Amino acid sequence: MHWRFLNVFSGFKKAALYLIPSLSLFIVFIFYPLLKSIKLSIFNSDLVGRETTFAGFSYYSEMLSSSQFLHSLLVTLLFTFYTVVPGILIALFLACMVNSELKGIAIFRTIFAFPLSIAVAGASMIFMMLFNPSSGVFNYFLQLIHLPAVFWLSDAHWALLSVAIISIWRSVGFNTIVLLSGLQAIPEQIYESARIDGAVSWRQFIDITLPLLSPTLFFVCIVSVINALQTFGEINILTQGGPMEATNVIVYSIYREAFFNTNFGYASAESVVLFLLILICTLFEFCFLEKKVFYR
């Protein structure tokens, strides 16, 4: 019994040595900032973010009773819906298209993966020119079909959707690659058996492709929701939360409260709520969506 305990302890020490580099990064860049934000959210602070006096939960009560924060929460959820659902559907369509063995299809795979190589600042500047109300390409095509020009980034009705289009374009390359890898992992023999039984293409997609691709779709859904809830770069460059707070998501509200209003306690309280929102969404996906996942 004593020797067994020593063997287990020796194995634990060996595993700990391998885990120390990863755990150190997690502690420095994730756990410490999270605990620091929680602590800062219950303290008043000075202009450089140092705790001064204990504030309790006053920032949380102020935030939850604020119509501006509730509006930011609604905008964040709308933006998540605008980006996650269309982004996954478009990526699924593209993945199915490039999964075929057509001549020259590798060129299209490279084109679809191209947005992965563009930084958020570069993508935002590209779309800023495309969205230009007087010389942008999008309004040019609208004029060709005799539709009025749209003020994409300065109209409160279109601004959030416009930023969502950029986010979808940036994420579709990653989603397509991941879904394509899931499609290529499905054995071709299953499709051959289905064709012998007389199953047409759309029945093969519903009865074979979607069930066997469900683990990959589940992963893409989780990653897409987390990324959408943390979107910042496009909004900071293009709209700064406007017009009329139409794109003021929680992440940008945190940035504005901390670095413009120097209200670090309130911004930390918002960041804690955002963390809880991401956690709740992830748990919801694991509790409800995972039941639809088919693990073969």
Image (cartoon, rainbow, N blue to C red):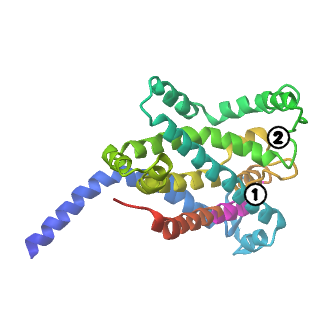
Q: In which quarter of the image is residue 45?
A: bottom right
Q: In this view, does 66 lie to the left or right of 198?
A: right
204 vs 82, nearest the viewer:
204
Check residue 270 for magenta coloring.
yes
Q: Name above or below for residue 169 compared with residue 284.
A: above
Q: Which mark is residue 75?
A: 1
Q: Is residue 64 left or right of residue 39?
A: right
> Where, quadrant-wise, is the N terminus in this rendering?
bottom left
Q: Is mark 2 on a helix, strand or loop?
A: loop
Residue at the location (41% across, 31% down)? 101
125 vs 31, nearest the viewer:
125
Q: Name above or below for residue 123 compared with residue 92.
A: above
Q: Name above or below for residue 56 compared with residue 171.
A: below
188 vs 91, nearest the viewer:
188
Mark found first going from the N terminus, 1 or 2:
1
Horizontal and vertical percent position of residue 97: 51, 37
Disc tally is 2
Q: Quadrant of residue 281?
A: bottom right
Q: Which mark is residue 153?
A: 2
Residue at the location (89% across, 32% down)? 146
Query: Bounds of the magenta span?
Result: 262-273
Residue 63 visible somewhere in the drawing: yes
Horizontal and vertical percent position of residue 36: 58, 61
- What crowding class fits label 1: few (fewer than 14 Cα within 10 Å), some (14-19), or many (20 or more)? some
Horizontal and vertical percent position of residue 252: 73, 51
**Residue type, numbered disc 1:** Val
